[in-house]
Image: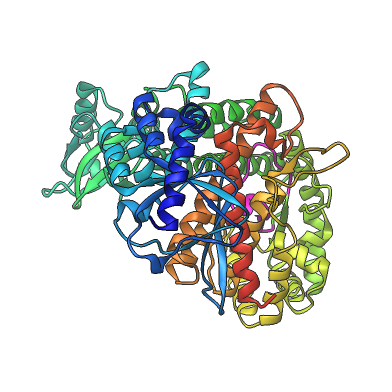
Amino acid sequence: MSKADAMADAGKTAVLQNIHGTMEFLQKFPPFNQMDTAHLAFLVEHCQLRFYAEGDSIIKPADGVVEHFYIVKQGRVHGERPHSARRGTETTFEITTGECFPLAALIGERATRTEHLAAEDTFCLLLAKHAFIKLFAVSNPLRDFALRGVSSLLDQVNQQVQLRAVETLGAQYSLDTRLGELAMRQPIGCAPHTPLREAVRLMHEQHVGSIVVVDPSDRPLGIFTLRDLRRVVADGVDLAQPIDRLMTPNPFHLQPDASAFDAAIAMTERHIAHVCLVQNEKLCGVISERDLFSLQRVDLVHLARTIRHAGKVETLAGLRSDIRLLVDRMLAHGASSTQITHIVTLLNDHTVCRVIELTLEDMGDPGIAFTWLCFGSEGRREQTLHTDQDNGILFEAADAAEAAAIRGRLLPLAVEINQRLAQCGFTLCKGNIMAGNPELCLSRQEWSRRFAGFVDEATPENLLGSSIYFDLRTIWGPDTGCEQLRAALLERVASNSLFQKMLAENALRQRPPVGRFRDFVVARSGADKDTLDLKVQGLTPFVDGARLLALANGISSVGTLERLRALVAKGVIDALDGAAYEEAYHFIQQTRMQQHQLQARDELPYSNRIDPDHLNHLDRRILRESFRQAQRLQSSLAMRYQL
């Protein structure tokens, strides 16, 4: 008998002598905690225990087709792969106690693409391939886990979140439901020459709130709604007129495969109550606001409309609690953190616009066209319930003298808007990054010079400013000036490699809180003892990294996830890496939002700090892996810019 065979037999004997203890160990970790006892016993009985000293190679691509399923019993395993930018290797992931590998290679009957090394003295349970195949065939939890990998873990977390919310709210359908499934009846249409009276009679008989005007090929030409009917009746319009003179032409439409969330966002952004469903240029359905929300108690469109028509600031302030309730309900209906931040930002935008309009009504229109800009998380459309103000004003002026005169007229208005936004729950910015600050109420030429200064003179203050101001977009007013600023900024950054390198150094300042010997690095003293910051230490590395790479590669997208996707499409980031970064960002943001919701319900101040020991095992495990993805992004920046 060879030495290797003898060691394998000894390892198997060690496992068999402690079957009960090994099963108890495995039952602490997914997917083993969901497996039938008989299947888990089969796994343990066919396992062998093997020791790997620190630095030992466990499996590598040169070994050929994978022959074993590995479970870490004690210790840590690092995944190493060749460096994409220079010679050597990089650590792409870490596997610790209770985790298993290499599922994709085992199922694909191929060699692993990554070398797995013992990061310290490590014991692994090994299950031979033939035994794994038998178990895979009979154990649904193992098969589901193996086929879906980390996504299975995230799905479990999302299901837990949804179940917790549903305990008090109930859920009838998901925001990911296809619109084709919600459009339960044939759409009501008519020809362009149909008299309005006849079209209205048809709407009444069919109990619908709209009728779509179609050509002989069923291609939608326009739409007429009950809202339009109220308008034409008030105007005394002759009901004998053909409907094509009174319809809204070129109605907005989506494909039947679009989601309920897509329709809700479209209705909210476009101020419409109906969305046509069109496939192959033919009308195949109509989704109304009533269709979208009659099955649940979430009414995004109604809340947005209430905000837009609020008659006073006090009403807007009162609606903030409705937004918090809406977020609860969105979680109950399966919304992701990305969808929720989009919704929160959208409703915040409506609130800001209405505050500006009410202030103009009260103080009088200054007679000057201006643009209300937002920066930071609001600029990226990544706001949560915990947000402060980051805003400014842009206007056009011929010269410095005219700019100063316009500024003098706009500043009192801006200060009042900032104060009223504070009444509505948008905290005043401690750094005074607000439109009421004379330094942020600027002409387009002044903004352009300021941005140029950030790039050309990369001081610590300017680098901090660029991390805020370069995530800008228009909330209210003409958008042309903002887009001109963005185009000039992209051109300037792309041609300045020194500024890019300094941005990269700045992006490496906030290190993810993952230790070498412990799960997390937490504060050791003070009020923050035993906690870490989900925003600063978790989300900021993704935000800063995506911003830098987007600016350097001429990508105009502002949102972090949109930037990552654009970078993948442009070949700047590997597709698998981009997907991993996106999933990690999503999970950290979701964990943060859950905490904010709990704080709001308990009437506690919002905080981004969390004690990881208060998380369950599954959440801790995925949070740790999410932080490691942030580490990987930072490592790639360090290599790219030779830091």
Q: Position of residue 229 (x, y in %)?
A: 34, 31
Q: Residue at x 21, y 48 (%)?
A: 279
Q: Residue at x 71, y 21 (%)?
A: 602
Q: Is residue 267 magenta?
A: no
- Locate the N terminus and report the quarter of the image it occupies: bottom left
Q: Nearer the viewer, residue 294 or 620?
A: 620
> Which range is magenta?
368-389
Q: Is residue 388 magenta?
A: yes
Q: Position of residue 515 (x, y in %)?
A: 70, 51
Q: Is residue 308 visible?
A: no
Residue 397 in the image: above or below residue 204: below
| Residue 54 left/right relative to 289 | right
Q: What is the quadrant of residue 406 in the picture?
A: bottom right
Residue 502 in the image: above or below residue 16: below
Q: What is the quadrant of residue 522 in the picture?
A: top right
Q: Position of residue 90 (x, y in %)?
A: 57, 67
Q: Residue at x 76, y 67 (%)?
A: 463
